[in-house]
Image (cartoon, rainbow, N blue to C red):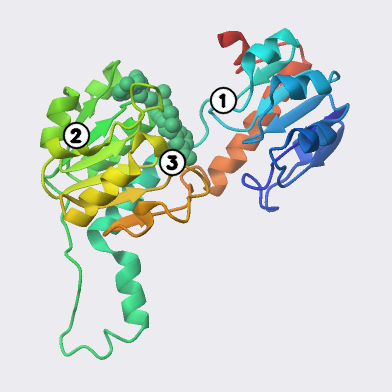
Amino acid sequence: MKLVMLDGYTKNHGELSWERFESFGEFVNYDRTPSDHDTIVQRIGNADAAFTNKVPITNAVLDACPNLKYVGVVATGYDVVDLAAARSHNVVVTNVPVYGTAAVGQTAIALLLEICQNVGHHSKAVHEGRWASCPDFCFWDYPLIELSGKTMGVIGFGRIGQVTGRIAKALDMKVIAFDEYPNDSGKAIAEYVSLETLLKTADVIALHCPLLPATRGIINKDSIAKMKDGVIILNNARGPLVVDRDLADALNAGKVFAAGIDVASKEPINADNPLLTARNCFITPHISGACTESRKRLLEITADNYAAFLAGKPVNRVDTQL
Ligand SMILES: NC(=O)c1ccc[n+]([C@@H]2O[C@H](COP(=O)([O-])OP(=O)(O)OC[C@H]3O[C@@H](n4cnc5c(N)ncnc54)[C@H](O)[C@@H]3O)[C@@H](O)[C@H]2O)c1
């Protein structure tokens, strides 16, 4: 049995174990694989199973690798695999539906707290000697914001949105949510409102919806115009939910007070992305799912998926969802 991990590095920097994968047979991990057809085909070769996070598995790749029986997507989103082609080649495809829900909610709140308290900035200032040389017992050089009593509006109130909502409630915020499919667990945390109402009334807007035709560019100059002056926007769902230029303009004009984003319209972020130079834009490099515990869980579930496939009872199958 041959197994190939095509891009293991972003999930395992070497501190986690590949033991489970090695236990299945001859296992090769590539930290990265360029997305060109020939390299992908050469690396999969005659393997029985391939694992991918971002490396595309196309119809042409499947044609060129006839021994492949299984593709394990080491992620939740599985758009890197041509599912119709997988079906026609009788290749089973699985994903990991849930592994970092708590950590992604935690990251949204981490971005919000950084915006409101500027811990990183003030700690740096202290280490640069600005407190030691200060004539007063304290100093700050950035507006500090109290969240208690403010309104958090969550767009997409599913698993992650509800984690963010629960933490926001613990910070004594009022939580409102817009979701196409309200549910009971959401109702226990937030008041569901229309998108219009959310845009008009939230002090902080957090995006936790999937990227769909209906949500692509949901944060744009028209929706921003409806928001409160000084609103804070958080996006650690998907970059294309936001029209970068429109958000950058609104930040520079002060209409949006600050933004906290962990995803970009293209990743890694383009060096000329206008958000890089926009005022008060806090950007982290797609680390929401990178907590050690989450990545460990991701690899465990990926291995469980493969074990279930070998036992003839595949779970978390996505090729049958067409
Ligand atoms: N940054 C990261 O590392 C990372 C990691 C995991 C997930 N994510 C993103 O977070 C998103 C949410 O993940 P989740 O686990 O909470 O998914 P989920 O399916 O539990 O929740 C998504 C919610 O969005 C709602 N929704 C669907 N269409 C909508 C629309 N048009 N408008 C408003 N709401 C809509 C759904 O009804 C659902 O309640 C994912 O789709 C993914 O894009 C990011």
| Amino acid carrying mark 2 in the image | Asp
Q: Residue at x 56, y 10 (%)?
A: 321
Give the mark, 2 or 3, whose residue is nearer the N terminus: 2
Name the mark on residue 212: none
Label 3 SS: loop
Spatial distance from mark 2 to mark 1, Cα to Cα?
Answer: 29 Å
**148 above or below 64?**
below
Give the residue at mark 1. Answer: 79
Name the mark on residue 265: 3
Q: Where, by quadrant of the figure, is residue 246 drawn?
A: top left
Give the residue at mark 2. Answer: 222
Spatial distance from mark 2 to mark 3, Cα to Cα?
Answer: 19 Å
Label 1 SS: loop
Query: Taking 184 as reference, is 17 left or right?
Result: right
**173 above or below 97?**
below
Q: Nearer the viewer, residue 288 or 60?
A: 60
- Viewer can see residue 23: no
Spatial distance from mark 3 to mark 1, Cα to Cα?
Answer: 16 Å
State the image coordinates of residue 156 (x, y, percent, origin top left): 31, 27
Give the mark, 3 or 1, whose residue is nearer the N terminus: 1
